[in-house]
Image (tube, rainbow, N blue to C red):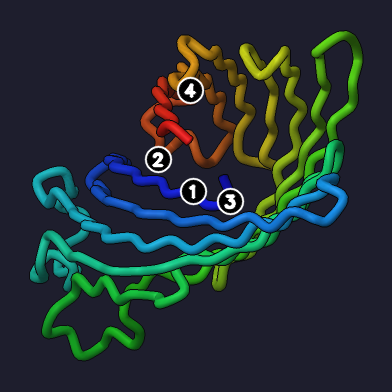
Amino acid sequence: MNAGLAGYLYRDETGPTSRNGIQLAYSYHVRSKNEKSKLGLGIELRALQFAINKSKLTDALGSDPLLNGSSSKIGIDAGAGVYWTNDKLSVGIAASQLIQSKLTFAEGASNIKESGRLYRHYNVTANYKIQTGDDIYLIPNAMARFIQNSPSEFDFGVNLDYKEKFWAGLNWRMNQFWSLQAGVKVLQKIKLTYSYDIYENPINVFSGGSEAHEIGLQFSLKK
């Protein structure tokens, strides 16, 4: 099968803010003549609701124009990427939030010079599979992320995979967090994943603590 279609529903809360979204992604794969490598092309569309619970804001904000604006905004955005892989090496580059939808909450404030928006994200990834035993692979990986008006981010990690039925790994984002991850294939088309994140300062000030847990359930459609 040379094409794939995926959909996501998500909700994320950070302090007084929350994000609800739906995302649709499509990919198409082109194999080389010798079947030893593959090129993947992908696009995605996303609808996002960004909301602020003003009851959680402190009085210290005073006359902040944000308090007079709407508490919820909806944006539409898109992304695209390209990915190349063979039996051992995989590399990719992708860009998200290409439209850069505006999310302006401060209404009627003449001193606001620039509207809030979803800035573009550029990601570069790479990983390499090292066979360490029968059906056991060690997979070091790295990712770089570049965002306008924000510091660049760099992730490094290593995963251990057994027959694509069980995997575990450790990842580190420089100056931000460590992440322990594990997953298991419950059924042929169902995977259960878990991650435990340990945050470094100053991000734990905004996360409400120094750690986080995440459980995921993945379904694969019949090919």
Residue 4 numbered tag: 1
- Identify which residue is drawn at 46% across, 17% down: 192
Of the image marks 2 and 3, the number of the one nearer the N terminus:
3
Say few, some or many: other residues with alpha carbon within 10 Å of mark 4 (under 14 / 14 to 19 / 20 or more): some
Residue closest to the eye, 70 or 165: 165
Say few, some or many: other residues with alpha carbon within 10 Å of mark 2 (under 14 / 14 to 19 / 20 or more): few
**According to the image, label 2 marks what residue?**
206
Identify the secondary structure beneath mark 2. helix
Residue closest to the eye, 74 or 197: 74
**Amino acid on which the number 4 mark rests in the picture:** Glu
Residue 198, placed above or below residue 136: below
> Mark 1 to mark 4: distance in Å?
34 Å
**Amino acid on which the number 3 mark rests in the picture:** Asn
CB contact under 8 Å: marks 4 and 3? no
Identify the secondary structure beneath mark 4. strand
Identify the secondary structure beneath mark 1. strand
**According to the image, label 3 marks what residue?**
2
> Mark 2 to mark 4: distance in Å?
11 Å
- Identify which residue is drawn at 69% across, 21% down: 169
Of the image marks 4 and 3, the number of the one nearer the N terminus:
3
**According to the image, label 4 marks what residue?**
211
Of the image marks 2 and 4, the number of the one nearer the N terminus:
2
- Identify which residue is drawn at 30% across, 76% down: 102
Mark 1 or 4, closer to the camera: 1
Residue 59, placed above or below residue 82: above
> Mark 3 to mark 1: distance in Å?
7 Å
User: Which quadrant is home to the N terminus?
Assistant: top right
**Amino acid on which the number 2 mark rests in the picture:** Phe
Of the image marks 1 and 4, the number of the one nearer the N terminus:
1
> Mark 4 to mark 3: distance in Å?
39 Å
